[in-house]
Amino acid sequence: MSTNLYHDLDAWVDQHFDEEVRFLQELVRVPTDTPPGNNAPHAERTAALLQAMGLTAEKHVVPEALVHAAGMQSVTNLVVRRKFGAGRTVLLNAHGDVVPPGEGWTHDPYGGEIVDGKLYGRAAAVSKCDFASYTFALRALEAVAKPSKGSVELLFTYDEEFGGELGPAWLLQNGVVEPDLMVAAGFSYQVITAHNGCLQMEVTVHGKMAHAAIPQSGVDALQAAVHILNALYLQNTLYQSIQSAVEGINHPYLNVGQIEGGTNTNVVPGRVRFKMDRRMIPEEDPTQVEAGLRALIAQTAAQCPGVTVDIKRILLARALQPLPGNQPLVQALQNHAQQVFGEPIPALGTPLYTDVRLFCEAGIPGVIYGAGPRTVLESNAKRADEHIELEDLRRATQVMARALSDLLA
């Protein structure tokens, strides 16, 4: 591929970057907090903005019954298809849903404010920024490279926070998308080829309510829950001895992220419920992990007279295992990211989990690459004052445009 072509692609992105930033600001200004997961309005706004650029988005509305069963309110997935000729289809997937803002913000989480070269807002870094990088990379490709082979598809989905079952999984099952290669939203300084799996479970501990003045007449569910939680937290110490061979991934770990129960301060709590998240390294068998946790919880509860437990799986996201066919993606992205960013860009794993696993489970090679800093921590993703460095956004867009030109050549 001509060096002049890459230069021209970079120049197009530079010339249209203000427009790209405005596009991202508009996306940040429409909330997509999940829960509650009322995300169809954002899809409608995105489709209108894309149409103004000459990009028609198909709207794939997920049936209401499926959405409500998943604990959400509305999901409309968007697909933009650009076919240039015979050849492979490269799909670019970013998700618009995100956790609620939470507390501690010093910038409006839906304002899209720009301060010192950073654009602030919930989902600015994960991953509405890649709605922008992927869209403008495609536009640069069409304007400059004018490809005559292959296809590019943009896929914007809205249930990554709930596991991707109503986004990529639903679209793949219904034959809406059938790409040959795919890239999903990520950060700029590494190409991710593997990631952890995730098991989420809800545990309900049942005791017996009683007046606090006569506690012996009840069974304290909270005391039993503490006993179970201590046994679970002990596992984190044991997990540190289990090391993954995948660079970028360390060891398994467990987190209890939510707990509620009881009725009043003067009542022995008769029920306590908590939700837990178990990250699984690629080498682990999810079936064995789940069976082991269920057994540990049941055995620990059995040590508490009068206590019973219910255990419900909320989510099982398998680890991303790299497919051999992902090499064209890895090579194109590493090569151009190194040139654009001026430093080596490693291919490695991440402790996160993503929707890419769903494509790879369907036999479609995929990797993770997009606009963002070196780490999730730097972006403040899922924390107050989430932001994207605009320079990272600009350069990631250039990398994607260059890589697409190689992949369709």
Image (cartoon, grey):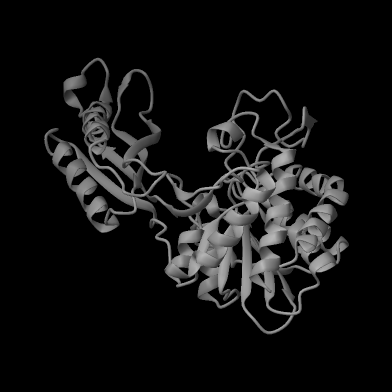
Q: How many marks?
A: 0
Task: Residue 158: tell me if it is visible.
Answer: no
Where residue 316 appears, x then y in whole percent? 38, 55
Where residue 18 appears, x then y in whole percent? 86, 45
Q: Nearer the viewer, residue 197 or 207?
A: 197
Along the horizontal axis of the image, is 397 left or right of 323? right
Along the horizontal axis of the image, is 344 left or right of 49? left
Name the residue furthest bottom: 86
Q: Nearer the viewer, residue 314 or 219?
A: 314
- From this view, report whether residue 323 is shown above or below residue 373: below
Q: Nearer the viewer, residue 409 or 112?
A: 409
Image quarter where the C terminus lies is bottom right
**Which residue is depicted at the point 79% across and 43% down?**
25
Name the residue furthest top: 213
Q: Nearer the viewer, residue 73 or 114?
A: 114
**Which residue is depicted at the point 54% across and 76% down?**
174
Image quarter where the N terminus lies is bottom right
**Which residue is depicted at the point 65% across and 46% down?**
371
Task: Residue 326: tell me if it is visible.
Answer: yes
Where residue 130 appears, x then y in whole percent? 67, 51
Name the residue furthest front: 3
**Which residue is depicted at the point 24% across and 43% down?**
309
Where residue 284 appears, x then y in whole percent? 28, 53
